[in-house]
Amino acid sequence: MKAIQYYGPQDIKYEEVSIKPPEEGEVVVKIMSALTCGTDVKTFRRGHPVLIKQVPSGFGHEFAGIVDRVGKNVTNVKVGDRVVAANSAPCGHCFFCKREEYNLCENLDLLNGAYAQYITVPARIVQKNMLILPDKLSFDKAAFCEPLANVVHGVERTEIKAGQTVGIIGIGPIGLMFARLAKLKGAKVIAAGRNPIKLKAAEEFAHADEIVDLTKYPNPEKIFKEFTDERRGLDVAVECVGLPEIWERIFSCVRPGGTVHFFGGCKSGSTVTFDTTKMHYGDIKMMSVFHHTPKYFRMALDYIASGNVEVEKLITDTISLDKIEWAMHQHIDGKAIKFLVKPWQ
């Protein structure tokens, strides 16, 4: 098959590679649609200690397709089924799984290889995180299940409620999806960013109530408060950038009694400083959510199938496999939200 192989930072190749035959419990999926992802862009730029454990490695992790082959004892899907699969699944037996904290599973192996014509899905993912698509749902939309599942997890754990004012800094695809789900919860949403493509999507996809161009209003603390009740600050402040300095600034945007959600992951070893007086005497809840679980993966599929989250509006363009490196640079240059990858064109 044709596939993108990852050899190291700034080093990926479009190659002919063998398709791994399915072992017991495994499934080979013919990939019909895949998506580029901010995590893949970070991996391309500087590597990834968790996502890439050896090289060469498959690359990409958001996809949907058709079951092409099945290993022994696969009972939940069959050849010809239209499916979507997550990039991980919990073991169900470790310390965290026993406490139903499945996203923290100690044996959470991450699946790569979506930038290819076929992908062999491990047995655990087949069993716990491979879903059959509704008949009318396209592969293009279904491929958004994995990134949306992370956001569903974040929104549910944040307990966003109708009538709250939610501010989001960082409107890449994750921030945009967070804004959209917050709107569906009935919140007033303020989205702040710098990129004109993403600011437009904040209006057309997320339907944010207020959109702040930080190139014109570089003081998010002030502008966020102007849009809140009595200018007291946000009920919920969400950071979707992953920079320590933005973590610190978003903290100052929330009102006493509010919640700060640090959703963007920072570089390993990063540290931040907060005003402990404001945190303690302001009764501020600080939280962060990582990854997804089978429950939230299923909820993501339901959101997409319902039509309430029009994920197709986040697609900048459609590309073939041999354009992946070009797409990575387009992301780095701020010229895209997500590319739809068609391995067979």
Image (spheres, grey):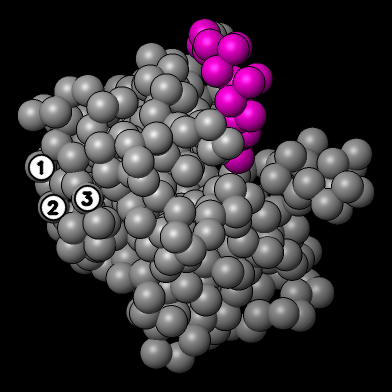
Which residue type does callout 1 highlight?
Answer: Pro
Depth check, front residue: 249 or 137: 249
The residue that mark 3 highlights is 210
Q: In the rendered image, is residue 165 in sight? A: yes
User: Do the residues bearing badges 1 and 3 touch, measured as CB atoms within 8 Å?
Assistant: no
What x and y, as percent, mark residue 285? 62, 33
Which quarter of the rendering shows the C terminus? bottom left
Query: In the structure shown, which secondary structural element does the residue marked by tag 2 occupy?
Result: helix
Residue extending farthest front: 230
> Which label was assigned to residue 196?
1
Number of marks present in the image shown: 3
Query: In the structure shown, which secondary structural element does the residue marked by tag 3 occupy?
Result: strand
User: Residue at coordinates 18% horizontally, 40% vertically from top-left?
Assistant: 212
Viewer-nearest of discs 1 and 3: 3
Part of the protein shown in magenta: 272-290
User: Residue at coordinates 75% horizontally, 75% vertically from top-left?
Assistant: 74
The residue that mark 2 highlights is 200
Q: Residue 257 magenta-drawn? A: no
Using residue 324 as the reference point, say whether residue 306 is left or right of it.
right
